Amino acid sequence: MQRRDLLAHLGRSAATLALGTLFTPGAGRSGERVERLPGGDDPFTLGVASGMPAPDGVVLWTRLAPRPREPLGGLPDAAIAVRWELAEDERFSIGRHTGVAWARPEHAHSVHVDVDGLPSDRRYFYRFHAGEATSPVGRTRTAPAPDAVVNRLRIALASCQHYEQGEFTLHREIASRDLDFVLFVGDYVYESSNARLRVRPHEALQPTTLEGFRQRHVTYKLDAALRAAHAAHPWVLTWDDHEVENDYAGAASRDPSRTAADFLQLRAAAYKAYFEHMPVSPRSAPVGADMRIHEHYPWGRLADLWTLDNRQYRSLQPCNPEGIAGGRLLTQCATLEDDAATVFGAVQERWIGEQLAASQRGWRLLAQGTQIAPGGIDTPLGRSIFSDGWDGYPKARARLLRAIAEQPQGNVVCLGGDVHRHVVARLRADPSDPRSAVVASEFATSSLTSRGLSDTATALMRSSNPDLLHARSDERGYVLLDLTPQRLRAELRATAFPVAADAQVHTQARFVVEQGHPAPQSDA
Ligand code: FE
Ligand code: CA
């Protein structure tokens, strides 16, 4: 696999050199200015993180920012050497790997180390050193070898952490759990604000520039509970809309005054700041307004997981004015039947189709931003749907469900978020036909903090959609998934809205999916 990273290689050879020479001011490899980290303030205010666990490696992340609310975190416009260490024990003596990476000002002094050549299925501790300072210690792991027999996989499925709408208390619990990884499916930061729901303020106005999006990520990363969840586990990530702008679709903004060119500039700034603050591979670094987030994660012979991107390549929501994005409630709309409408875009759709068809592992987990199961409400005027979800793209959904139905091994489970409610659903080959076969299970997690729909609307949604076995918008939460070759167990963790710092967390419901039986069953 293409996990080769220049910095890691530089790191490995540099580790044998006297490190002192790398920390002295002078010319860097490409001739840029290199500086010693100014002493004094702790440069690791934004914590450490790891992600994208692979059978032979994992990505380590940090960003140097001694004064994180200042431009460039209070650092000079120069590259700074950061030494990383990874080992099997907390004293960094067993199976130790180390290297040097450059924190470069053009990436806000973030560091993304794609460590490769590691043994599979191994747990690790890691940390960084810059100047005199040492970072907090993080914990991570590599994935099992692709052909290894694996008996268990534990995931926390989470999404939607509006900073203003609640404390990140659920991250404390996630940090304390014994997990293989956190699967975060979008709305990591929110660009927008709602004064009526504010329990703590975003520290700046809605971002539109690179500096603005960096500041937004800083506000989130300064939350200690979020840093703890990153330090405790590797994260596997995809995004939804709020990392850029609510309800955007491809190159279309919901702001009619923004042309596609303007919006792509904003999207480029948002993706760049996202990259700079996330434990994703340096290979994922955006090029202009494009950044690949969809990936395949094999987990021994137990599971294939795919992260999917439902924003960057999607076509405009149906029945919208030309070129203007945004979700709406629709009852009548001819373009709903448009075959060309797409959620994943042609290239990603072909990719996931081929991946699904070829997959031989025990379980197939499709992780994407939102709810696939229909959620429209039957009204006297007809069915009312929200056009930003999969309900707005029924032809694209039909194609995805056909690819799932044709998967020879079955055992497909769809994982999503975005809807701010815990949802457990049966997915049918043809969702409009109640006699059509159930082909997969779906779990959409509630939000970590963001407010959900009213109970009245949620009750109408349940009664209009018998395949929604569970749907509750009143509580915030996340989903613990525990997979074995025989079954997948899902525990829906929950707490009241708005989430308080000392919130009590309880189990709202338990479901199980048995191997060979696509429908979820209550496991109360
Ligand atoms: Fe959300
Ligand atoms: Ca969303």
Image: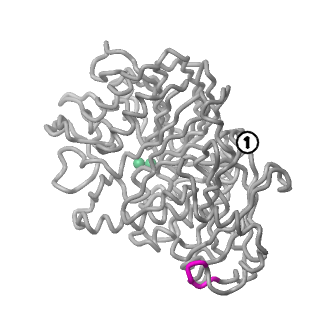
Residue at x 61%, y 73% (from the top left corner): 68
Nearest the viewer among 7 and 258 is: 7
Residue 456 visible, this angle: no
Q: Which residue is mark 1?
A: 122
Total labels: the figure holds 1
Q: Amino acid at mark 1?
A: Arg
Residue at x 64%, y 49% (from the top left corner): 57
Residue 108 sits above or below residue 150 on the image: below
Q: Which residues are magenta?
A: 29-34
Residue at x 48%, y 45% (from the top left corner): 295
Query: Where residue 224 sits in the image (x, y, percent)?
Result: 67, 59
Q: Residues within 10 Å of mark 1 (few under 14, many from 20)?
A: some
Query: Where residue 214 sits in the image (x, y, percent)?
Result: 50, 69
Query: Where residue 490 sits in the image (x, y, percent)?
Result: 58, 28
Q: Is residue 90 magenta?
A: no
Query: Where residue 302 sits in the image (x, y, percent)?
Result: 60, 27
State whether the magenta stretch is mostly helix, strand or loop.
loop
Q: Is residue 50 left or right of residue 83?
A: left
Residue 60 sits above or below residue 1 on the image: below
Q: Residue furthest top?
A: 435
Q: Is residue 404 left or right of residue 34?
A: left
Q: Secondary structure at mark 1?
A: loop
